[in-house]
Structure formats: C-alpha cells, structure tokens
Image (cartoon, coloured by chain):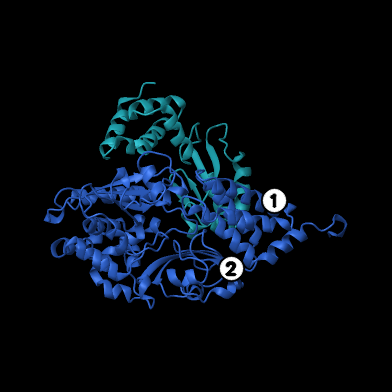
Chain colours: A cyan, B blue
Amino acid sequence: MEIPEELKKKWDEAVARYEEKRAALLPVLRLSQDHFGYISAEVEEAVAHYMGTTPVHIREVVTFYELFHTKPVGKNNIQFCHTLACNLNGCEPLIKQLKEKIGIKEGETSSDGKYSFSRAECLGACEMAPMMKINKDIYGPLDKDKLNEIIENL
Amino acid sequence: MTEKLITKYLELTDANKIDVFESKDGYSRIQKVLKELKPEEVVDEVKKSNLRGLGGAGFSTGMKWSFIPKDGKKPVYLVCNCDEAEPGTFKDRHIVTSTPHLLLEGMMIAAFAVNAHKAYIFIRGEYERPYERLAKAVEEAYAKGYLGKNIFGSGYDLDIVVHQGAGAYICGEESALLEALEGKKGWPRLKPPFPAVVGLFGCPTVINNVETLSYLPLVMQGGADWFSKLAGEEKSGGTRLFCVSGHVNKPGIYELPVDTTLRSLIYDHAGGIRGGKQLKAVVPGGISAPILSAEEIDVKMDFDSLRAAGTMAGSGGVMVMDEDTNMVEALMVASRFFAHESCGQCSPCREGSAWLYKIVKRINEGEGRVEDLDSMLSIAGNISGTTICALGDAAAMPVTSYIKKFRSDFEDYISDCHLPVETQS
C-alpha cells in the first residue's frame, strides 16, 4: 500500500531519534495506528518494508502489545480497569452498568462506531479507583451517577 | 510532620513548567554537580545515601551504577523506567505529570555519574497525558540549552528521548524493557550478562526507576548523610513515596521515612479504614507482594524489615482490604492479572499462571473442591524460581500467601458453596 508522505515524514523523524533503526518500531507502529486507526495486514507489510524487516516480525510485535489494534475501534475507546484496587472499590457493578448502557460486550465496537469497550489491567491510577480511560483521558473515582453522566456527554 | 522532598514539587502549582521548577532550586543541583564534582564522587555520594531502587527491587542505586565498566570502549546508556504497571502503584504517573523537570534533573545527574550521553525514558503506553507533559518538559529543557551539547556550559553533552511503550506489564522488567526499546516483543533476557555490561544495543546500560532518579537532585542538595538519616533504618535510604489505595478513607501518595510502620501509614496518614470497619489484610508493595494479615501491620516499611516479615516493599503500592473483603475474589483478580500478563516465554509461568487463574476462578464461581487449594500451592511452588525473570515468582507469591494466611476463608467459601441443595435457604 501507498504510505502518505506526511506519515512517512513522521516515521523518518522517529527513526532519527535512535542509534539503530529497529528501535523506532514501536513509535512507527504507534504513528501508523494514529494515522489509520488500526494496523491492518497491509500496514504491517508497509512497515516491514520501511523498517527492513519481515512482516512476521511486525505481526509478532503488533500482537504482543495490548495497545495495538488489528481492527477498527470506536470513536470512544473505553477501557475499564478491573484489577485489585478497582475491584475492591466495586468496579464490577459499574462495568455491568456500562455494558448495558452502551449495549456492547467486552471487546466489541458499537455498530455506529461510537464506542469500543474492553476491560483493562491496572492503568496506574489506583487512588482514583474505580476508574476508566476513554481515549487519552482517565476518569475516577466513579460511581453509578458519574459513570452515566460521563457516557451521556460523550 | 515529616520532610517533603518530592512531594514539595508534587504540591507546587505548575511545577511542570520550567520557570516554576527553577524558582524552587530546580536545575541548581545539576549545575553544582557539573561544576564541583567528578562522576565517581557522585557515585560515592549516592552510595553513601543508601538510596535504593524504588521501582521495586530495592537494590543500592550507587552500587548499580558502579557495575558499569570503566574502560569506555562502548557508549553507556541511561534508561529511565517509567513503565509503571505494578497494580497498586501510581507515583511515577504523578511525578511525570506534576514535576517532570525533577526527573530530568535527576537523569542529568545519573547520566553524568555513569558517563552516558544518551538517555531514554521508557513510559508505559497507557500514560498518554503524562507522556505529553514529559515530552513538553524535554522540549523546554532543550529550548533553554539544558539538554543537547555542552549543557550548562560544562562541556558535557546529553540527549534525552522519550519512548512510549505499547501496553505490556512485562516491560517493567528491565531486560524486557530493553527488548521493547530495541523494537521487539518484551521478552526478558537471560542474566548474566546484566544490563550494566550488555544492555541497550549491546552496550553498558543503567536502568533506574522514575522515583529513584527524581530523588537524586534532593540527595545531592541535602547530602548523603542527611538523606540516609531521614529514617531510623539507614541502610534503606531516607524517604519514599507510598501509594495507598483500597478501603482507606484517604487514598493517595504519602512521602514518608522508610521506617514508618504499615499501621501508621494506614491509620495516621491514609485516614484509617473506610466506614469505621476493621482491617482484614494488606498487600504492602504492589500486587506481587505476599499479603499481610491485620495482625502483621506493625512492621516497618523499609525493604529489609518487610523482607524479614516474609513479604516485600516492592514498588510501594499499598492496597488495603477491610473485613468484608472476599479473599477468594481478591486472589482471583490477582491471578487473572498474572495469567493475562505472563509474556509466554517460560513454560512454568505461562502454563502455571493460566492454571492458577482457571482454578481460583472456578472456586470463585462456586465450583471449588477442597483439594484445589493444595493443587494451587503445588502449581505455585513449581513456578517459583524456575523462570527467566521474577514475574514467575510474582505470580506465585499471592497464591501462596493468600492461601496460607486465609486458608479458612477459602475452605469456608468452598464448603458453603457445596451445601446440598435442600439445606440451602
């Protein structure tokens, strides 16, 4: 596939920061995902070609890390933390409430593309438990009403 | 009231901005170091301060630096570990968000001490707003000439690059972090060789945690003697940031001398147990740390005292559980975490963590059998010490300690769920 010049330029800038080109792989993949929304097999091939490595190496890296998507995600990507501090503070009823509200199950994207939902392991904000992350921002401590309000304002 | 070191900056409004940071001694410590000290004098001072690795290992920071070969044949790298992902821990997020320049100043001191001219900050992929703050701080430092060539007119060059991870707990393990930084999946490396000898790009590398590095300007300012004596347990250094969460009235970060007791941390600082309830258990150092029962909280929070109590200080993540906590569910959550985060390289951890989760999940769902508990202890025993990195042990420790200390909770849960149908009310 053809990689747009502006993205290619960002790749080059990322590579320039490192002693060895291979080190720029995570940034290059992140830039690609920011651009295309997810990392398709075609993007993997283009990245492999650019980085001078094999598509299988790119696939290995893409599937190892949690934050790379291999299919499109919703406009609001909701990750709800369910690890210990959030569990102790009652995340489970809130997760149930969220799923009912947006009408999708874990790992799904709503048909209108508005929401994606997944459970997340500790997001490093236990003082705000129970908490969730929507795109780049974190929200907590949540309760029934706050959760409703945040989702309704999306 | 105890002395506020990092907290002084965390509480300062707009301390993320370089001018505000500089108005409170910011970047004065590195200038003094560059002007007055030789690298080996910095290493000695940090050794004397007993500053320990606050990412979780608790190893002497100055000692770690001294393992870097002095022959100068290869470039030396400094890597800051900001892959904060140990459940219960959130201090590094606050440092990079609220006072990123303190970290940068600390990195300058560390880089100078080990003669590194290039440093990387590996920040976990989920920390997106913190990353933006950090990237902005690096930009500000370059704009003022504090990074790049000839910093502060000293003739010393230093570049810092911020590198975003992509979501994997394992990358907090330092050799997995290096793999990720080299563009690979984060599989821990066999050691030896240790990163101090063969690290990033095959070169000598020092990897230090955000909090450890952020203490360096303060240690250099106050002196090693002063810092080490902030706590009664001098071998553990002075203070650290404790992250308190769970069933407490005031969850948050508390910077305290390391000889503070767990009881004092929970009751005097974090406001005690919510709703006036009784304490049941505490995880004292991140989810990997063996759990303590309510009777064991008079222990001091330094690395050595907690080790002697059969647990660990780890990352300083203290998770508090009240009397109503279901220990089966809590262990299920911990085991789910490790099953999800096992990188898959070593069979004992990959298979063992998955089985532990399957069994405890079944117990939690009411299908437990009494023999499950011994099976779990046996599986945990077969993971301990049989894996390349410490994460295998981390997966095993909660299982062993929860079942040992709260066995009757598990047994009651299993037997209650197996009451014959006709006797259930």
Asked whether the residues under the numbered discs 2 and 1 touch, taking CB atoms below 8 Å apart as contact, a structural biologist would say no
Question: Which residue lies under the disc numbered 1?
Answer: B362
Question: Are the numbered discs 2 and 1 placed on the same chain, yes or no?
Answer: yes
Figure quadrant of the N terminus of chain B: bottom left
Considering depth in this image, is B38 or A101 the residue closer to the camera? B38
Q: Which picture quadrant has residue B422?
A: bottom right
Q: Give the mark, 2 or 1, whose residue is nearer the N terminus.
A: 2
Considering depth in this image, is B54 or B424 the residue closer to the camera? B54
The residue at the point 69 percent across, 54 percent down is: B364
- Secondary structure at numbered mark 1: helix
**Disc on res. B96:** none
Residue B13 appearing in the image? no
Chain on which label 1 sits: B
Q: In this view, does B26 lie above or below A4?
A: below
Q: Marks 2/1: CA distance? A: 23 Å
**Disc on res. B281:** 2
Q: Residue A109's x, y, as percent?
A: 55, 35
Q: Which residue is the extreme one toward the right?
A: B422
Figure quadrant of the C terminus of chain B: bottom right
Q: Residue B6's x, y, as percent?
A: 33, 65
The residue at the point 44 percent across, 61 percent down is: B315
Q: Residue B417's x, y, as percent?
A: 77, 57
Chain on which label 2 sits: B
Q: Which picture quadrant has residue A38?
A: top left
Please, what is the three-letter code of the amino acid marked with disc 1? Arg
Neighbour class for label 2 at 10 Å: few (<14), some, many (≥20)?
A: many
Tag in front: 2 or 1: 1
The residue at the point 34 percent across, 30 percent down is: A51
Please, what is the three-letter code of the amino acid marked with disc 2? Ala
Q: Which picture quadrant has residue A105?
A: top right
